[in-house]
Amino acid sequence: MARPRTLLPADSPGADVGQLLADMRGGDASAIQRLVPLVYDELKRIARAQRRAWADADTLNTTALVHEAYMKLARGRENDWRDRAHFLAVAAMAMRSILVDHARRRHTAKYGGGRAAVDVAKVEALVGTPPLAANEDLDLMLALDTALAQLAELSERQSRIVECRFFGGMSIHETADALGVSPASVKRGWALAQAWLYRELAEGPAS
Amino acid sequence: MTRVAGDPPIDWDRLEHLYAELTNIPIAARAARVALVGHADRALARELGSLLSCESRVEPFFRELTRVMVATAADLVGADAP
């Protein structure tokens, strides 16, 4: 996933996050395209400010990160739970972009330009063994992004669920609110998506 | 992938419901249920059986994937440090 193109600078008068969230909720699909770059930039700013905590973390505290971004960007609308739910989904999408873009840059720096040759055939054997080497981490992040794009062709909802749950650290209920589906649907979709992603990644790129 | 040339498209919503249903019944009872599905839709049953066979390895894999994501994030903020 390429870094979202910034259509509106964050400090432009038109970049009203609250209005974009309202537009998104009203069914304006283009609002999400304008929101993601704003959230992307804000998340990166906050992550840099918190880098010491991130560097030592065993888990990624996405919830705190996203909350801070929401408080900064959605001034005056902090108490609107519907806006918050939609914001979380956008933040999860931005988080995926940030991490995958970084993995791609690292991969290019290590192995040169061109499309990354992702070798994840060993993934199944690696589960439960010592952590992957750094280059295998990069491969896995890129392979996950590719597999998620393939999953979106089968089920856009399941792909979004993975973004929210995995990249956004969102609960079942937060994901359900953000995507406008039932918690039961999120649970079912999450379970199948995980199994499918495991199989795709363990077996390597789908033919 | 478990698709065979000529297979019809899989009903993904039905697959999702069946996967949820079968992961909540004893493992010993699953094969019979998959076989039953196969009477009406062989491609769906193949996909279902394939995904069910992965079930026990999914959780450790996602734990590892989470570690990879955290490592990538830590590397990112480290790389961005002034």
Image: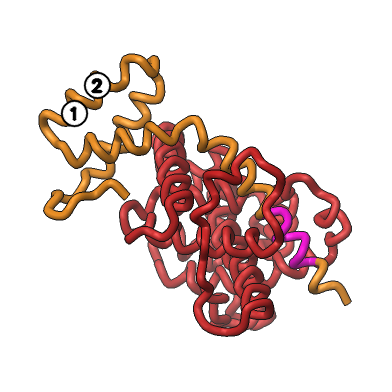
Q: In the structure shown, which secondary structural element does the residue marked by tag 2 occupy?
A: helix
Asked whether A132 or A9 is in front, the reply is: A132
Total numbered labels placed on residues in the image? 2
Residue A17 is drawn in which quadrant?
A: bottom right
Give the extent of the magenta segment.
B69-77
- Residues at marks 1 and 2 on the same chain: yes
Q: Are marks 1 and 2 in contact (CB under 8 Å)?
A: yes
Q: Is residue B50 left or right of residue A45?
A: left
Amino acid type of the residue that numbered disc 1 sits on in the rendered structure: Val
The residue type indicated by label 2 comes to: Arg
Question: Disc 1 and disc 2: Cα gap in Å?
Answer: 6 Å
Label 2 crowd bin: few (<14), some (14–19), many (20+), radius 10 Å = some
Picture coordinates of residue A201 (x, y %)? Answer: 47, 52
Q: Is residue A18 visible?
A: no
List the residue tagged with mark 2.
B33
What is the chain letter for disc 2? Answer: B
Q: Which residue is mark 1?
A: B37
Query: Is B82 placed above or below A62 here?
Result: below
Colour displayed for chain A in the image of the structure = red
Residue A116 image position (x, y, % from top left): 53, 73
The secondary structure that most of the magenta stretch takes on is helix
Give the color of chain B as drawn: orange
